[in-house]
Amino acid sequence: MHNKMLSDLTPAQFLQRHWQKKPLLARTGLTEFADLMTRKNLIELALLPKAESRLITRNGRQWSVRHGPFRRQDFAKLPDRDWTLLVQGVDLLLPRARELLGRFDFIPYARLDDLMVSYAPPGGGVGPHFDSYDVFLLQGEGRRRWQISSQRDLTLVNGAPLKILRDFKPTHEWTLESGDLLYLPPRYAHDGVALSDCITLSVGFRAPSAQDLCARFLDFMQDNLDASGLYADPGLKPTRQPARIAPQMAKDLLKMLAQARWSRTDMLRFIGEDLSTPKSQVVFEPPRRAMTLPAFAKTIRHRGMQLSAASILLYDDKAFYMNGERCLPPATAKTLLRRFADRRMLAPASPIPAAAAEVLYDWYRAGFIAPASD
């Protein structure tokens, strides 16, 4: 089915022609979400301790960055131009923002990062830069000029508080207005400058580096190794070279290190737990008065059920992964749990096998899911 937000391409056509390959501009691609945020609303979010916010100002070629939470008076002192307020993770704070992310469900949830929203008066921006991940840039209110380049020189300005390109050479330029949507692949140089008071909504997709992924896997394996034994050398002889690592000692230690092995099963478990782990600042709140299992089952049959805003529920062929924890439910529960994971909700009156209800009940008591609102 053709999709206006993809410039009348089907999701399959977009992924084949543009995803991680080349930009796409969709005029009036998502007008229904252009009014999602206002300057006033964004400032209110930036005052919250749980919001991840930044205030970026420019004076000529000099940039400065401040991190929130902010106070109202911080915004009263700002000039009429050349600054930007950014708030990350808006999808965790606003239900309608989660609806916007739902429009991108043709891309796996494991790739989805968050919704960042920025406000800028004329001249505001964060300088020419590149992202290491895919991003969709939706213009809210106002107008912003975007310049982009596929240049290979991605050298950054030394000593700058932001990752600003030293030599930006734009090859294309567009002015985005309310509802316009621009997709940029990873490492595509771009610079967005506000032409009027404007809001920009950025849907980002995470892409872990091999270095970070391997480092996290080795951390994971620390708790999953089953190495035994303690180094011993009962036949030790006197030495005249005490600083030397003797061949026998090295051989014995190599045998101990050889126990540090892992299987494909270990790696698959790590992948599921790692991809489903929420950001470090996320805190889940269990219900104050948890229902009993029978009452819970009756309630979700009547009202339906939904994932909590910050929850990440993924699955593979063998297991489910809820917020970094692996779950191996009975076979009779898997079909319903997969449907729940894909849709992030279950409609009222959905048949719920007893085995699935028990799994859902554990997640409910942890604060990972909740009955849908009436």
Image (cartoon, grey):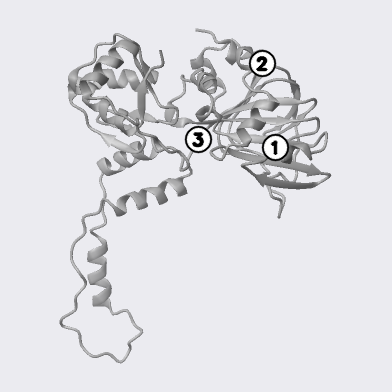
Mark in front: 2 vs 1? 1
Q: Is residue 160 above or below residue 94?
A: below
Q: Which mark is residue 179?
A: 2
As drawn, the residue found furthest toward the front would be 289
For disc 3, the marked residue is 206
Q: Residue at x 49, y 37 (%)?
A: 207
Percent position (x, y) of residue 161?
69, 50
Between disc 2 and disc 3, whose residue precedes? 2
Q: Is residue 349 above or below residue 191?
A: above
Q: Is residue 52 left or right of residue 210?
A: right
Q: Is residue 258 left or right of residue 165?
A: left
Q: Residue at x 73, y 18 (%)?
A: 177
Q: Residue at x 56, y 37 (%)?
A: 51
Q: Quadrant of residue 165?
A: top right
* Whether residue 335 can be seen here: no
Q: CA distance from mark 2 to mark 3?
A: 24 Å
Percent position (x, y) of residue 372?
38, 17
Does the CB distance between marks 3 and 1 fall below 8 Å?
no
Amino acid under disc 2: Gly
